[in-house]
Amino acid sequence: MSQQSEFQQRLTAELDEAGFILSTAEWREWFVDVMDLGARQYERIRDLLGSDWEDVTSHFRRVRREEHHHGLLGYGFITAKYLAAPLDISPENDERLGRLGANMIYLVAHFDWLVDDGYDHRRVMSKMGQMVAMTGIRPLTSLYDYFASGLDRCFTRIFADYYHELKALPHAGDRSEVRQTHDEMVEEMCRAERASVTGVDTAETNRITSSYPFVVIGLPAWLATPTFRTDRYRVHLDWLEEFGRLLWFMDDAADIHEDRREGFYNEVTARLKRERDEAVIDDIVSCAEQVRSGWSSRVDESACPDLVAKTLAARVTKWMGGPRAD
């Protein structure tokens, strides 16, 4: 991130005081472990794409080094585990949820990067490719894979792998409320992504593209729990939406300068035009505290690995310019 503005400095100070900024030692330990996770997911994606891998990477201008891929995949993997931690998930399904999170974050980030680099969004992943992938039907996805080409084939293959993994969860076929909400949010997210790159950059498209990916990767956990209660599910869904809202705020708070320069909608900038700085800062910090308390009240932190437990603070730390000095 570029030199912080006065607003960003004040927000960082308030978040630090509230315990959301890691020390250099804490950050380094979390980062190294997440990169190791990401390296394993990177090999999985390379294997999935096979001979098409080199073709895909040749298109990347901003993300060519392996470390960038490791970071994205590791972050998606550990975030899915963080979001599932309040629920009763077996180790096998916990790993599958991690792979789902890695795939989704990888797809969203690379779609944005490639389109930002001038690629037509229809070349990156077509509407037809999206629809086929979302069926999760292997003969159909394999047929599309045979006839598709270039980036569309590769990105559809990763998206299809997401749905193959999703359908392998034990209750993917009998919890229709969860699947319907999940699939509707994926559809809305894809529509908003396409709208945003064709000039429709509104508060609503900004909210959906920034917050929905994190709700989406949290929902599959409810297809893996041994029991299901509607009241618990809806409480968790509300918390996932609050988590997504926080990450929307944090992303836009970090990108104030870049979005202004590029002419993109920015929720934090829009709110700063209507409200005092202090009110916006208080709302962001309050949102972060609600997410943290909602997680802590449902998780036995003594039994939760530090790597998972520090996920929220690590992401805030990265967005707000890095760790504080030890």
Image (tube, rainbow, N blue to C red):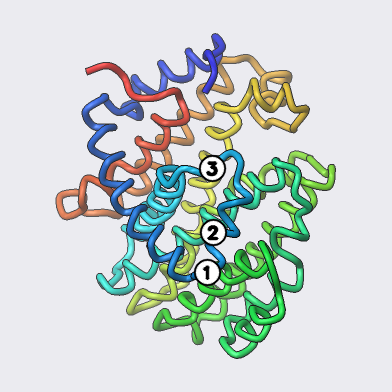
Q: What's the amino acid at mark 3?
A: Val
Comparing 30 with 13, the one in front is 30
Camera-nearest label, 3 or 1 = 1
The residue where tag 1 is placed is 51
185 or 72: nearer the viewer = 72
| Type of amino acid under label 1 | Ser
Q: Which residue is drawn at 21% across and 53% down?
A: 304
Helix, strand or loop at mark 3 = loop
Count of numbered badges drawn on the protein: 3
Vertical comparison of 282 with 31: above or below:
above
Q: Where is residue 208 in the image (x, y as percent from the top left)?
A: 66, 49
* Label 2: few (<14), some (14–19) or many (≥20) C-alpha neighbours in 10 Å: few
Location of mark 2 (residue):
54
Farthest residue in the left direction?
Answer: 302
The local crowd at label 1, few if under 14, some if 14 to 19, many if 20 or more residues have their Cα within 10 Å, is few
Task: Specify the farthest residue to the top.
Answer: 6
Q: Are the residues flagged by discs 1 and 2 in contact, CB closer than 8 Å?
A: yes
- Residue 63: image tag: 3
Task: Specify the amino acid type for callout 2.
Answer: Glu
Q: Which mark is residue 146?
A: none
Q: Residue at x 60, y 84 (%)?
A: 142
Q: Which residue is drawn at 71% across and 74% down?
A: 148
Residue occupying the point 51% across, 73% down = 161
